[in-house]
Image (cartoon, helix red, strand yellow):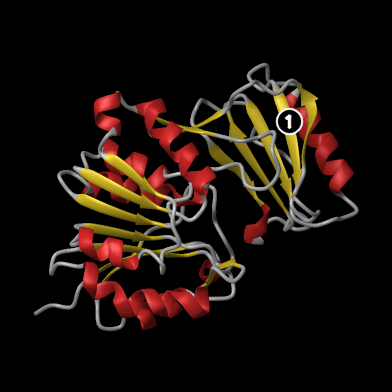
Amino acid sequence: MKLPLTTLGLDSQRLLHGRGGLFPDMEHIAIDWFAPVILLTLYAEKANNAELIAHTIAEAKKNPDITAVVVQERHLPKAPKQTVYGELPDQVHAVESGLSYHLSLRQNQNHGFFLDMKPGRDWVRKNAAGKRVLNLFAYTCSLSVAAIKGGAEEVINLDMASSALATGRKNHQLNFDPQTCRRASYLPHDLFKSWGRLVRGAPYDIIIIDPPSNQGKSFNVETHYPKILRRLPELLTPSTQILACLNAPHLGEDYLTDLFTSYQNHGRLPHAPGFNDQTPQAALKALHFSPPPH
């Protein structure tokens, strides 16, 4: 395995996307660059894990820009992280297109930023000027930051995880002055229990739907995505733009197109750099729709 660890730059990037199935014996790993840290994520216990870690450390030692290597074992309970080389800075940010986002590289589970959503953030930033944006399943609000940067008039971020939204608020503060930050609001609520509040705030010019594929009883994509579609017209104008996302490997693009069968389909966004996949239908799907023509 040869890792491209020589000229990394400041922008965060996926260095090796083993899960895309294009690298034999490395289907269970992902390697990301969040300057000045390499994050090696293991999704399974394999015989070559120790060798992969050792090789990554050896390559990192050749580049003075890399100050730490962190290994996360997603196949273990609570997905623990461990710094296996160097010293982890107190704070590491993801950097993308001139914007910065807080990362959690010490705590377990997700670090707070998904590199494969870059095309979605680019699309929102390009289309948000003067718009009211509803960001459902906002998580740490990276799409909201992109919308505000693109000139959105207002972004309403909804996610039932208040801690994720707290990070989202910090992400806005990291990039904007206090006055600009006021364009973003945060609703730490369950979507279906708060639908009436969203209807009262409707309509919206852009609606982002980016749910988890499975989050226990609160959201299952095959049960709850259709439920969103049934009530979505309550939030729309004839010109509303919808970014509908799906990150369930077992469901292809046609799952979304079937749900949005009466809507205008403007196509799927391209995959993010570094995320080539031998099975594109298993990768993140982000499709652009608008309401049916009248």
- 73 displayed left or right of 276: right
126 or 89: nearer the viewer: 89
- 124 displayed left or right of 192: left
In which quarter of the view is residue 292 placed? bottom left
Relative image position of residue 199 (x, y in whole percent): 24, 65
262 or 231: nearer the viewer: 231
Q: Residue at x 67, y 47 (%)?
A: 109
Q: Residue at x 13, y 77 (%)?
A: 293
In which quarter of the view is residue 105 placed? top right
Whether residue 53 is situated above or below residue 208 in the rendered picture: above
Task: Note whether residue 26 is visible.
Answer: yes
Whether residue 15 is situated above or below residue 179 in the rendered picture: below
Whether residue 175 is situated above or below residue 44 in the rendered picture: above
Q: Residue at x 29, y 67 (%)?
A: 196
Residue ranking furthest to the left = 294
The residue singled out by tag 1 in the image is 69
Relative image position of residue 28 (x, y in whole percent): 74, 56
Relative image position of residue 110 (x, y in whole percent): 62, 47
| SS at mark 1 in the image | strand
234 or 100: nearer the viewer: 234
Q: Residues within 10 Å of mark 1 (few under 14, many from 20)?
A: many
Q: Where does the N terminus fall, quadrant-wise?
A: top right
269 or 5: nearer the viewer: 269
Residue ranking furthest to the right = 47
Inspect the image, locate mark 1, and give the three-letter code of the amino acid beneath it: Val
In which quarter of the view is residue 57 placed? top right
Q: Residue at x 38, y 28 (%)?
A: 173
